[in-house]
């Protein structure tokens, strides 16, 4: 009887201990599991590459977005987002119609901005105004061209120069000099004409879920190359595919980046979301159709 009692007491005690151990283990697993999963998923994707190698070109994709409420100090400044600018027939033949604005329509869009008295400003002008809570000329607008395609130089740049406009080129530096992309010489010419060249990673990598190693490599290599070829270090970034996340945003801030462009639509730019500024994707309609 006494033996049974001891056995029962010991069993109950053992079950209690097992319960505590199981609970503690489970609690730890619950806390750590998402981190472990995220790390392993990303590690599988990270392949160290040399800066001298050319990454393979990839196409822009439409991103999903999270609407951001306007708060803090805001300015109503449309940031127009372009990719390819070339004749529609050529874009169709090359298979990128969805990312193209016909060069004739683009010319009429720029003529419209000029006739309406718009002031084209650089991304730096916009970020400076937001950070200083300062003013900018009325009817300010930011023209952004992503990915460094050679058709910008052929079809858009002459129009930009004709109106004495400022363009902002978001460049994946590792793709420059590849077939279909601009050369560093062309970028130097554009940069010295009043337009600005900015960091859009090295290989046009999606960084929203990337490891810190990949984020560091992609962004620091692009800044080194822009500094090497154009003589300045940009501190404004544009997320490829509009793919952002807390890791890349924290990295950018830690490296002194002052602003970044997302693909979240909207014309209000606020100092509460300097690292996810909004843009308006432009297609083959007149700009009045986009509220410009
Ligand atoms: Zn891009």
Image (cartoon, rainbow, N blue to C red):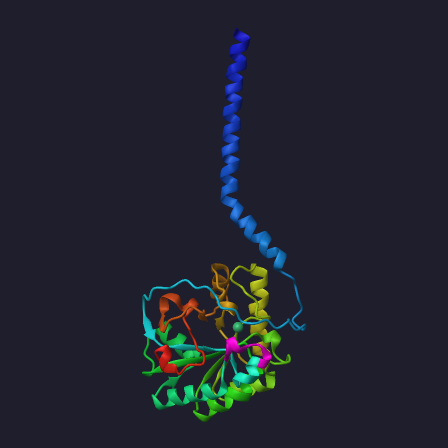
- Looking at the image, the residue that sits furthest to the bottom is 162
In the depicted structure, whether residue 104 falls above or below residue 127: below
Residue at point 33% right, 74% down? 75
Q: Quadrant of residue 139?
A: bottom left
Q: Quadrant of residue 73?
A: bottom left
In the depicted structure, whether residue 123 falls above or below residue 30: below
Question: In the rendering, at what x and y percent does residue 225 appear?
Answer: 59, 76
Image quadrant in which the C terminus is located: bottom left
Residue at point 48% right, 66% down? 63
Residue at point 41% right, 62% down? 66
Residue at point 36% right, 82% down? 288
Q: Is residue 140 left or right of residue 105?
A: left
Residue 27 visible in the displayed image: yes
Residue 230 visible in the displayed image: no
Q: Quadrant of residue 81?
A: bottom left
Residue 54 magenta-highlighted: no
The secondary structure that dominates the magenta segment is: helix
Residue 97 magenta-highlighted: yes
Q: Is residue 144 left or right of residue 47?
A: left
Magenta region: which residues?
A: 93-100
| Of residues 31 and 59, the one drawn nearer to the viewer in this rendering | 59
Question: In the rendering, at what x and y percent does residue 55 appear?
Answer: 64, 71
Q: How many marks?
A: 0
Question: In the rendering, at what x and y percent does residue 161 appear?
Answer: 47, 91
Question: In the rendering, at what x and y percent does residue 34 appear?
Answer: 52, 48
């Amino acid at each position: 009887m006494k033996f049974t009692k001891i056995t029962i007491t010991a069993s109950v005690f053992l079950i209690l201990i097992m319960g505590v151990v199981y609970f503690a283990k489970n609690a730890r697993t619950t806390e750590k599991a998402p981190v472990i999963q995220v790390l392993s998923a990303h590690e599988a994707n990270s392949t160290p590459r040399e800066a001298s190698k050319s990454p393979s070109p990839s196409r822009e994709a439409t991103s999903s977005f999270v609407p951001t409420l306007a708060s803090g100090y805001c300015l109503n400044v449309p940031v127009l987002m372009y990719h390819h600018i070339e004749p529609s027939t050529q874009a169709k033949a090359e298979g990128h119609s969805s990312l193209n604005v016909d060069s004739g329509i683009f010319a009429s869009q720029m003529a419209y901005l000029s006739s309406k008295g718009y002031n084209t400003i650089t991304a730096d002008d916009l970020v400076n105004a937001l950070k200083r809570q300062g003013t900018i000329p009325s009817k300010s607008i930011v023209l952004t061209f992503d990915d460094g395609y050679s058709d910008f130089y052929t079809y858009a740049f002459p129009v930009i120069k004709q109106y004495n406009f400022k363009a902002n080129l978001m460049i994946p530096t590792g793709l420059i000099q590849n077939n279909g992309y601009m050369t560093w010489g062309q970028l130097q010419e554009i940069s010295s004409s009043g337009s600005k060249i900015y960091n859009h990673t090295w290989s046009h990598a999606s960084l929203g879920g990337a490891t810190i190693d990949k984020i560091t490599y992609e962004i620091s290599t692009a800044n080194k190359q822009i500094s090497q070829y154009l003589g300045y270090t940009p501190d404004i970034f544009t997320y490829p595919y509009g793919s952002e996340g807390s890791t890349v945003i924290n990295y950018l801030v830690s490296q002194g980046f002052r602003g970044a462009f997302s693909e979240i639509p909207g014309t209000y730019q606020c100092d509460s979301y300097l690292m996810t500024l909004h843009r308006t994707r432009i297609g083959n309609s007149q700009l009045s159709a986009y509220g410009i």
